Image (cartoon, rainbow, N blue to C red):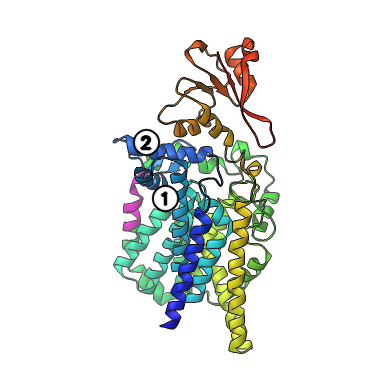
Amino acid sequence: MARRSLIAVALGLVVVGAAVLRFWDLAHNPGGLYTDEAVEALSAHRILTDPEFHPVFFNDGGGREALFAYLVAGVFRFAGETTMALRATAAGIGVAGVLGIWLLGRRFSEWTGLVAAAWAAGSLWLICISRDGLRNILVPVLGALALLALLTWADRPTRLRAAIAGATTALAALYTYQPLKLLPLLVILWLIWLRHADRERYFRLRNGIGWFVAAFALVAAPMVLVAVTDPAAYFGRALGVTPFAPETGGVNLIDHWLRTLGMFALTGDPNPRHDVAGLPLLGWPVTIVAAVGLVRLWLDRRRPGPSLVLLSLPVFLLPPLIATEGGAPHFLRSLGLAAPLAVTIGVGVAELLRLIGDRWRASARCIAVAVAAVGLIGLGVASGVTYLSRPVADRYDAYRFDLVAMADAARRTDAVILDDYGATVIRFLDTNGPPAVVAPGSAISQPAAFGRVLALDSVDLVRSLGSQVTPRITVIARRPDGSPSVYAASP
């Protein structure tokens, strides 16, 4: 009982720590509002306000699964349609991801579950994605639950468990974010491996495969219908980031692959929304622990759990290796690794504790437990300080503070010169009184109809209003370095 109570207290502290790291100062940090976040918020707004709008997939924004927008809409209904509510939705899902990883990890051992959850709670990688209002935050929690459902089915292969595993796999694979679309491939490889490594278990699982497939097909049907009826929208984004796409054809694949493979200890994501200061995903100490976990999993590879995690790692490493658009490494495309990587780290710590206990006395193992706990706490503290101490100058462009400043200044009688993508921030923040939107380079035929015209560049104002407007252009917002970021002119 004392041991169970201790584990419960430790898990409670991990969850509290995860919540603190995800919600602390969320109203001001990261600040601004990135355009992709605004797209999700506008979709949630339309779900709430348009009774006939109930899609499972959005064609805009490069194509997006709608599950996250529905969750945001639920929060908006009770908390109001704000940037804080949008990001709080993601933060709450991020905490749920820590619990999902704990549930998966404890299938290996109590220590594995606690360490996996503690690492996930304090990982700078997962903290970053938990504080942005984007759908990719669904990957850690639903990825963990899908793997858990598969292992539960393997433990006792019944029809019900097969159906639950199929439904969960379909939900995670098709309604979250691109990396988990490889879950069906993972299931196939895992079953092939079990046929080789544990034939008795495989034959028991085979009896329920029909139920797995039927449940998968039932949950997948709405998204499959979208893919069949509008393949260009559904597959366009995925195909557009591969080396075969014209816009990515000039990428050095060797450099891309090396940077991606080095992301665990050597290289970091250059995108400041995905990472801070280009820090590696794990760092050397945690990478070494994960390597120990890999060895232990390999030794146990004939069992369902270790084999599933071992197969997950290369399968979910494929998206960041294949997708070459954007910076490398790309931490968002690596999110399928979150749950299996956390378990690998947990297995590594548990294995080190076992080796220390076998080699030395129990007192040495207790010291090792204390060292592991201090290390995990230190990781969380360091990640929190690293994330929260970033100055606004490092976040300004990445989170479009300029568009937020424009939205704050714009009135319904004004016009803003923006492309349609950038205008999403204005449309969400000024939902109750949006200004008119004018495409860059377009002439405003009746300038007197607007109180002011706002733009991110004074050149845009001259192009739309004519050179005579130059003396009336003023700066209404500046970057942290003092340079202008938003201009206004009175027609």
Task: Looking at the picture, tell me which residue is in the foreground, 93 or 230.
Answer: 93
Task: Looking at the picture, tell me which residue is in the foreground, 117 or 334.
Answer: 117
Residue at image position (51%, 46%) is 27
Task: Looking at the picture, tell me which residue is in the foreground, 387 or 247.
Answer: 387
Image coordinates for residue 10, horizontal then vertical, percent: 48, 72
Q: Is residue 222 magenta?
A: yes
Q: Could you tell me the amino acid type at mark 1?
A: Leu
Quadrant assignment for the N terminus: bottom left
Q: Which residue is mark 1?
A: 174
Tell me the element at label 1.
Answer: helix
Where 118 falls versus 445 (above or below)? below
Looking at the image, residue 179 sits to the left or right of residue 172; the answer is right
What segment is highlighted magenta in the picture?
Answer: 214-225
Question: Image quarter for residue 265?
Answer: bottom right
Q: Which residue is mark 2?
A: 46
Q: Could you tell me the amino acid type at mark 2?
A: Arg
